[in-house]
Image (cartoon, rainbow, N blue to C red):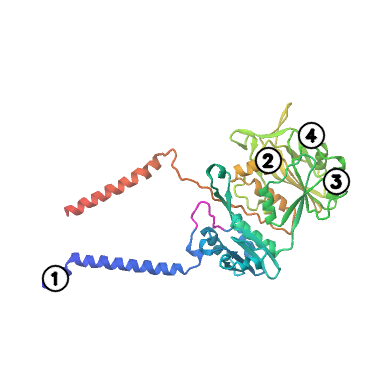
Amino acid sequence: MKKLLKKFRSLQTRYGFYSVGMIAVVIVIAVVTNLIVGQLPEKFRQVDVSNKNIYGISKTSRNLLKDLEYDIKFTVYADKSSTDERIKTFLERYTALTDKISVEWINPVDNPQALQENEDAQSNSIVVSCEETGKSATVLFTDIIVQDYSSYYTTGSASDSEFDADGQLTSAINQITTDVSKKIYYTTGHGETTLSTSLSDELEKSSVTTEELNLLMVEEIPSDCDLILIDAPTSDISEQEETMLLNYMSEGGKVIYVMGDASTETPNLNAFMEQYGMTKTDGYIADMQRCYQGNYYYIFPEISASGDLGDGLESDMVLLVNSAGFTVQEDLRDTLSVTQVMTTSSEGYAVTEEAQTQGEYTLAAVAEEDDAKLTVIASESMINSQITEYFSNLDNSRLFLNLVMNNFDDVENLSIKAKSLSVELNTVQHAGSISTALIFGVPAVVLIGGFVIWMKRRKA
């Protein structure tokens, strides 16, 4: 017994008890901490550290939720246990920003009658409703997690490409809480292009709809027209159409004219521009200073977009390809003002077969007179889907949407860019001395240091 007590009183035994005690304390702290954290709201428990930031909620959404006047209900028709974790997590984070939103989950399998009672309901959807306005909107899970089917016929499967919960939910709330809507008529009959599906969808998020209009087939501009879009015509308008547009503008109308090919002769459209202080330049515009990889006809314009026009611009870079150009007249009438939005650098050139004329050229501008507003964009490439999709990090689409919404005083731009879900691999390319030191040097130092300490303790 004395030998046993002696062993318990030894220095090694006391160190052993101390170690065991410390381990027990750490385990208890870990368990208690997890229990406490488990009771915290989702927004505090999960931190989005991905480079996609799919759970990030935009400033646009935060402002809308902060100013909500009505109570909103999210009815989720899905099995919560099998619903994608990304959707559940975002819903918790989104609704935690306001006490005006309540969430109810209904499993259609257990309660099939619920789908029949609500004509807006579908399996795997969120019905956003407001009792006070009597309106509702449906957001499908497939609209939140968008799939790319481009490889379906080769691989037999589709991949998740975008996460658009922020934009879809905010748009749905806006639709059911406001009575304000706008209508854009886009002209036809002159080889115009039409807006891409993605741009049309973004406009619809702000309650803006589009419809075609052939000016030669109507006696006057429709009374519900809030904006006319002339998108990259390949031929000129007639004098009759020019007169109709000028009359529309004299009554406070709004027009956006996106120039087509710079080589196309458009004397009537040019005359329409000149009435509002802008003169088209002959030829294509090149920029020796602000160009893409040495291609002088691929221009990154200087952007002068402040206030609402600059809202949401992330890179402050827009790419225009084979652009036309124009200049702002010096002697404008007192009632007319022209604001330049995009220009070349001083190293810009107007290039024709006969000459190359250096100067600073305007690539987008807004002319205002009384309530009338004419917006001119010098190149259809600004909203060409091939460019906006390939260079998704640029602000082409966002600036165009801002220019559209700039025509409406009572409509907020609720366009929120979807988050990409494409896989990005972290790889080390062209490792230099720093990379080599991190990969090989740090582990070597740790191993050598550990060996030295072990040798010292062994000798002791």
- Closer to the chain start, of discs 1 and 2, is 1
Say which of 147 and 189 sits in front: 147
What is the residue that sits farthest to the top in this orientation?
Answer: 354
Disc 2 marks which amino acid?
A: Ser
Residue under pointer 1: 4
Q: Which mark is residue 73?
A: none
Q: How far is disc 4 from disc 3 in space, using C-alphas?
A: 23 Å
Q: Where are the magenta residues, as a range?
A: 48-56
Residue under pointer 2: 381
Q: Which mark is residue 265?
A: 4
Residue 175 at what x, y percent from top left? Answer: 69, 61
395 left or right of 40 in image = right
Say which of 113 and 57 sits in front: 113
Q: Residues within 10 Å of mark 1 (few under 14, many from 20)?
A: few
Residue at coordinates 19% horizontally, 64% vertically from top-left? 12
Q: Residues within 10 Å of mark 2 (few under 14, many from 20)?
A: many
Between disc 1 and disc 3, the foreground one is: 3
Between disc 2 and disc 3, the foreground one is: 3
Secondary structure beneath dot 2 equals helix
